[in-house]
Amino acid sequence: MKNQSISAVRDRSLQPSDLPLLAESLSSDAFHKGTTPEFFSQYGTVCNVYEDDKGPICYVRGSKALRLELHFADNYDAERNTDALRNGVATLAQKARENGFLEIVFTTNNPALAAFAKDVFGFEESAGELRKVL
């Protein structure tokens, strides 16, 4: 068997000229159907293209997300916990938005908290995380 040379992988920032190939790639991808190339160049995000001598290998998009960890002093004090969430999350979301964050993300194993976050604040569940786009 003949040794094949492996070309070095390079990275660079996504350019407008990359969008047609990215669009074609997305449209035929089983995992990203419906994702537009503009998602990768959205304001407030960064995107790198990883490529070798054969061309693009992958596109990696990064965004500024605020990851929360929640702990209640008393899980059974529903009234105070609800008040704290109602008053705190809206303020926190506004401050995050003002500071350039694009989304809030958290995980929980508390079904009542997850339901509250979805019902009251519009979080969406995706792959075990609760996400809210700001």
Image: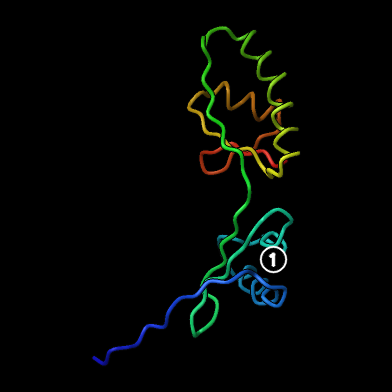
Q: Quadrant of residue 89?
A: top right
Q: Which amino acid does label 1 sit on?
A: Pro
Q: In the rendered image of this protein, does residue 55 appear above or below residue 36? A: below
* Residue at (49, 75) in percent of width and height: 10
Who is closer to the viewer here, 83 or 116?
83
Helix, strand or loop at mark 1: helix
Q: Quadrant of the N terminus?
A: bottom left
Residue placed furthest toward the left: 1
Percent across and percent down for residue 9 are 45, 76
**Which quadrant holds residue 67?**
top right
- Residue 107 screen position, x and y as percent: 52, 33
Q: Name the residue under label 1.
A: 37
Q: In which quarter of the image is the C terminus?
A: top right
Nearer the observer, 91 or 132: 91
Residue located 56% across and 32% down the image: 68
Dividing the picture into quadrants, the one containing residue 99 is top right
Question: How is the protein colored in the picture?
Answer: rainbow
Residue 49 place in picture, x, y as percent:
57, 70
**Residue shown at the point (56%, 62%) measured from the top left:** 60
- Pick out the residue farthest to the bottom: 2
Q: Which of 11 and 27 is in front in this view?
A: 11
Taking the image as shown, residue 109 lies to the left or right of residue 6, namely right
Residue at horizontal 70 percent and vertical 78 percent from the top: 17
Residue 14: x %, y % from top left: 64, 69
Label 1 Cα crowd, 10 Å radius (few <14 / some 14-19 / many 20+): some
Q: Is residue 99 left or right of residue 9?
A: right
* Badge count: 1
